[in-house]
Image (tube, helix red, strand yellow):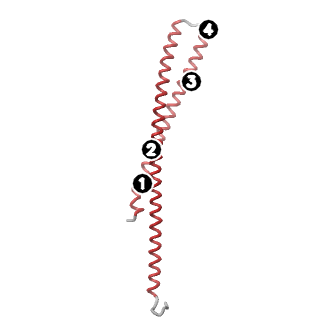
Amino acid sequence: MNRSKRLEPVARVADNRQENAARFLGQCQRELAASEHQLQELVAYREEYIRRFDDAARQGIDAVAIHEYRAFMLRLNQAIEQQSRAVDSARVKHEKSRVQWLEARSRAHAIDAAIGRFREDELRVADKREQFEVDDRSQHRRTPGGHE
């Protein structure tokens, strides 16, 4: 079996790894986008809540409402901090998966290139062999007097 055929199973494994890495990268991209979206929603909600509280405060509010506002803002800020950490974690995971995909893609391309070079070499060898055989048959058909 020639070298290009022997490497085909290796190429299939490399292609499968690249496809799996690409799928995982896509999943990580979706998770990152969802985390970022959730963080944006929390921040937008906080801004809206602050605006509403300011409007209510202009009309006058009691101490209980202020206390409830502060407690709620504390919980909301904690949720934003937690979601911000989740976004950071998703970014790290996404970057790692991107690097893994790039490495898998590079390996798959390298193996494909090697197979291509091996096939070219094999074709050159086969062409030389065929040319030699044609030349050899041509010489054997000639008679000793130099005529065919």
> Of callouts 1 and 2, which one flags the residue occurring earlier in the amino acid sequence?
1
Q: Secondary structure at mark 1?
A: helix
Q: Which residue is mark 1?
A: 12
Cα separation between marks 4 and 3: 23 Å
Give the percent coordinates (x, y) of residue 42: 52, 24
What residue does disc 2 label?
100
Amino acid type of the residue tagged 2 in the rendering: Gln
Residue placed at 56% from the left, 18% from the top? 49
Tag 1–tag 2 contact (CB < 8 Å): no
Quadrant of residue 24 within the rendered picture: top left
Dot 3: what SS? helix
The amino acid beneath tag 4 is Gln
C-beta proximity under 8 Å, tags 2 and 4: no
* Between discs 3 and 1, the one toward the N terminus: 1
| Residue placed most toward the observer, 98 or 64 | 98
The residue to which callout 4 is attached is 59
Gap between marks 4 and 1, in whole Å? Answer: 71 Å
On screen, residue 36 above or below 127: above
Specify few, some or many for label 4: CA neighbours under 10 Å numbering under 14, 14-19, or 20 or more: few
The crowd level at tag 1 (other Cα within 10 Å; few <14, some 14-19, many 20+) is some
Q: Could you give the CA–CA distance between mark 2 and mark 4, rounded to whole angstroms?
A: 57 Å
The residue depicted at 47 percent of the width and 77 percent of the height is: 131
Nearer the viewer's eye, disc 1 or disc 2?
2
Q: Mark 1 or mark 4, which is nearer the start of the sequence?
A: 1
Structural distance between the alpha carbons of marks 2 and 3: 34 Å
**First reached walking from the N terminus: tag 2 or tag 3:** 3
Residue count near mark 2 (Cα–Cα under 10 Å), binned few <14, some 14–19, many ≥20? some
Question: x%, y% of residue 81?
Answer: 48, 24
Mark 2 against mark 4, which lies toward the viewer?
2
> Tag 3: residue type?
Ala
Q: Which residue is mark 3?
A: 44
Give the image location of residue 65, x and y in percent. 53, 9
